[in-house]
């Protein structure tokens, strides 16, 4: 017996709830009545009209008519796998999260995805990839909802509908940006230049991974670890694939999209089935939790910025192994619901405004995608720990809740006392001072630097990688119809690097503009690489 036998409220039932076999010697109706046959509807005579009284016919067709649910508003196309996460115990001094303890094994479910395409789109398009992990820990579910690119397009969640609308198919022809008119995407990212860094990663080989098994993953935002003494450390999460990072080249990606649009999901499932179980090491970059939340001048609350690994090395804290394919795509891959607010003691969020907006968005969208507020009871979403949440009723409620007093304290049910006491293992948010010293809709001044890290990324590329980036910008921008958008894009590139801008301009047959800003050259001082080591895990 395992978690499979828990009822939605966490009580052991002994009856496997997840594995409902559709087999057996005879068919029944949904009500369990044995059927005589299922291929002919009830008619008024062999050649007569079909009778409304044929409940089996109506039940079967009605159910079929309602088989589809809305696809995710973003990240609709995905593939997933079950696995296990093993903690190394190396993070014990900075977090009390029990699943990171030495040799603790935690079941996980990981869903990889593209962002913009619909559920039936091709796997190998140029796009960001989602990398979302659900840890079914002994302290409740922890979700790490990341991407394969360490930065994001925008700094504030209020722009998320805008950037997605700019990238999704045009409303008139429903032609995806990935294949046709590119104007709105490039219009957005050249007018909202905070998108420059992420766009450059997309135009690099990172935008066309060879395999889900060969992608890095990033939590993107800065999170907060809390240890047993209440001391806090800021962290950035990294997944490092054991197989290394590999990409397709653009021609391969395009041909594969036509020849085998399911290439990535097939690759993942085939590898696991063959026993070549993909593995990733989970690591963290760690930073002191200072009042200004800056590290070496980098604003840790700005999701368009990385902290170079030379400044803060990634320190391994556990190993992920994917070892089983889902047995039902709909029940598992489609119905899984990740959320940044699914946290366990020892891990907390920060004030990154993008992260804060995400905390609202996922639950909200899942209520409409999964038909009401009870999707947490679906087998794939259910914690592997007892649940006693006092939530009641609602669409698709499957629990038969008992007790007359779903509130605490109460004097009727002999209910547990409600003690917000850390000693009980409860989740307690870290208190943070609020600085209301500026207009509330303003962003921090450090959010205004949109180019220096894009330049850092460009400078870190090999000549071949640079060729690929130039080719990608040239190809994508050549699809824009509006000349002004191409010119604005060249201006953005000029602010990153004159060589990059010049080569793309030549490819587009346009003049290369001069930069409008001057960036400080990055300091490659070897002393910087020592800095991370002054803040070790143990
Ligand atoms: C879905 C990552 C920003 C809204 C997803 C998924 C991933 C992801 C991996 C797919 C989850 C799955 O496999 O089911 C990220 C990352 C972000 C980011 C790394 C930035 C760092 C945002 C923002 C918003 C947002 C700013 C909204 C304000 C959504 C929504 C879904 C989604 C609505 C669909 C969820 C569902 O239907 O279950 N995101 N996202 N995301 N994301 Fe984000």
Image (cartoon, rainbow, N blue to C red):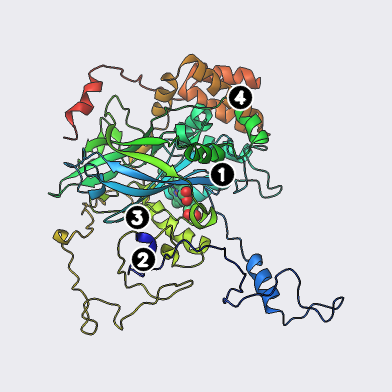
- Gap between marks 4 and 3, in whole Å? 40 Å
Q: Which mark is residue 116?
A: 1
Q: Between residue 345 and residue 157, name the one nearer to us.
A: 345
| Image depth: mark 2 or mark 1 in front | 2
**Residue sitting at 32 percent across and 31 percent down?**
307
Labels 4 and 3 touching (C-beta < 8 A):
no
| Image depth: mark 1 or mark 4 in front | 1
N-terminal-most mark, 4 or 3: 3
**Residue sitting at 53 percent across and 38 percent down?**
270
Q: Which mark is residue 6?
A: 2
- In terms of secondary structure, where does tag 2 sit? loop
Residue that numbered label 3 is attached to? 341
Note whether residue 479 is visible: yes
Q: Between residue 400 and residue 233, name the one nearer to us.
A: 400
Q: In this view, which residue lies farthest toward the right?
A: 47
**Residue sitting at 21 percent across and 22 percent down?**
530
- In terms of secondary structure, where does tag 4 sit? helix
Relative placement, left or right, of 515 versus 430 is right
Q: Is residue 145 above or below residue 472?
A: below
Q: Which mark is residue 474?
A: 4
Relative placement, left or right, of 329 versus 57 is left
């Amino acid at each position: 017996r395992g978690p499979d036998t828990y009822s939605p409220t966490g009580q052991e039932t002994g009856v496997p709830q997840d594995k409902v076999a559709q087999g057996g010697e005879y068919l029944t109706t949904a009500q369990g009545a044995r059927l005589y046959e299922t291929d002919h509807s009830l008619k008024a005579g062999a050649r007569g009209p079909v009778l409304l009284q044929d409940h089996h016919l109506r039940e079967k067709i009605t159910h079929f008519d309602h088989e589809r649910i809305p696809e995710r508003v973003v990240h609709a196309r995905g593939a997933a796998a079950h696995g296990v996460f093993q903690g190394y115990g190396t993070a014990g001094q900075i977090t009390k999260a029990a699943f990171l303890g030495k040799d603790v094994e935690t079941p996980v479910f990981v869903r990889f995805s593209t962002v913009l395409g619909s559920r039936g789109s091709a796997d190998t398009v140029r796009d960001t990839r989602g990398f979302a992990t659900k840890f079914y820990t002994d302290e409740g579910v922890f979700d790490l909802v990341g991407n394969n690119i360490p930065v994001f397009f925008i700094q504030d969640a209020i722009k998320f509908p805008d950037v997605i609308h700019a990238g999704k198919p045009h409303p008139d022809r429903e032609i995806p940006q990935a294949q046709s008119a590119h104007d709105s995407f490039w219009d957005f990212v050249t007018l909202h230049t905070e998108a420059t860094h992420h766009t450059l990663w997309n135009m690099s080989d990172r935008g066309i991974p060879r395999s889900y098994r060969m992608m890095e993953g990033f939590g993107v935002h800065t999170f907060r670890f809390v240890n047993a003494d209440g001391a806090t450390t800021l962290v950035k999460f990294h997944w490092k694939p054991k197989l290394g990072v590999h990409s397709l080249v653009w021609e391969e990606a395009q041909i594969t999209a036509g020849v085998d649009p399911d290439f990535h999901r097939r690759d993942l499932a085939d590898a696991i089935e063959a026993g070549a179980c993909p593995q990733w090491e989970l690591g963290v970059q760690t930073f002191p939790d200072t009042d200004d939340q800056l590290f070496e001048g980098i604003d840790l609350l700005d999701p368009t910025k990385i902290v170079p690994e030379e400044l803060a090395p990634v320190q391994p804290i556990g190993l992920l192994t994917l070892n089983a394919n889902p047995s039902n795509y709909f029940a598992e891959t489609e119905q899984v619901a990740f959320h940044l607010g699914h946290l366990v003691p020892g891990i907390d969020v920060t004030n990154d405004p993008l992260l804060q907006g995400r905390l609202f968005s996922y639950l909200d969208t899942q209520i409409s995608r999964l038909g009401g507020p009870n999707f947490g009871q679906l087998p794939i979403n259910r914690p592997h720990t007892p649940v006693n949440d006092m939530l009641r009723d609602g669409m698709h409620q499957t629990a038969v809740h008992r007790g007359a007093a779903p509130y605490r304290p109460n004097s009727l049910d002999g209910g547990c006392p409600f003690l917000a006491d850390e000693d009980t293992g409860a989740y307690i948010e870290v208190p943070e001072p609020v600085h209301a010293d500026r207009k509330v809709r303003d962003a921090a001044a450090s959010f205004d630097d949109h180019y220096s890290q894009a330049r850092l990324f460009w400078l870190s590329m090999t000549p071949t990688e640079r060729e690929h980036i130039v080719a990608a910008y040239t190809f994508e921008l050549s699809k824009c119809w509006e000349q002004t958008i191409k010119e604005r894009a060249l201006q953005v590139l000029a602010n990153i690097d004159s060589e990059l801008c010049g080569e793309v301009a030549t490819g587009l047959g346009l003049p290369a503009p001069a930069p409008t800003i001057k960036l400080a050259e990055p300091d490659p001082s070897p002393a910087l690489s020592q800095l991370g080591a002054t803040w070790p895990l143990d």
